[in-house]
Amino acid sequence: MIQTTVRFEELFNEKLRIAMAKRRVRSLQQAVEQALEDWIDKGGAPGVIEAPPPAELAGATKEELAWCGKLVGLLREGEPASIDLVQHALNRHARQARDRRKQAGS
């Protein structure tokens, strides 16, 4: 096991301890390990800060946000044929939704 010293600003330390209590995490080591595991699993990079979701995703469920993340991952790193297929399906759906709104407004 490697031992490391971490220093936090007083306000951050207070926020950290409150968050740990809410999550019933008993040790700072456990909290740091969980946070770093999550960060690594999400492909985190130094300086990457998750932005709040755009207005059109306000109120989205965790499952909906997870699917959005999967789509973004596919669009960024997928095979070109898969990307074209997904883009075509999304565009078709957007056109159909727009047409339904137009018909409902007429």
Image (cartoon, helix red, strand yellow):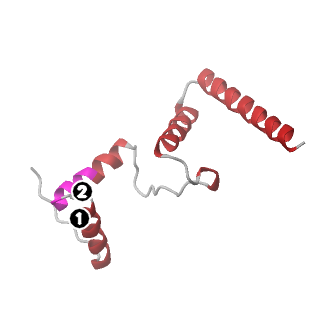
Q: Is residue 77 left or right of residue 102?
A: left
Rendered image quadrant of residue 99:
top right
Q: Can you tell which of label 1 and label 2 is closer to the viewer?
A: 1
Name the residue that disc number 2 marks: 32
Secondary structure under tag 2 reads: helix
Secondary structure under tag 1 reads: helix
Q: Residue furthest left?
A: 1
Where does residue 37 sit, x and y in percent of width and height?
28, 46
Q: Main secondary structure of the magenta part?
A: helix
Q: Is residue 5 left or right of residue 8?
A: left
Q: Which residues are magenta?
A: 26-34
Quadrant location of the C terminus in the rendered image: top right
- Residue type at tag 2: Val
Nearest to N terminus: mark 1 or mark 2: 1
Q: Going 35% across and 49% down the picture, which residue do you hit?
A: 39
Name the residue that disc number 1 marks: 21
Local crowd at mark 1 within 10 Å, few (<14), some, or many (≥20)? Answer: few
User: What separation in Å lies between label 1 and label 2 (alpha carbons)?
Assistant: 14 Å
Q: Residue furthest top?
A: 81
Q: In this picture, is 38 found above or below 9?
A: above
Rendered image quadrant of residue 90:
top right
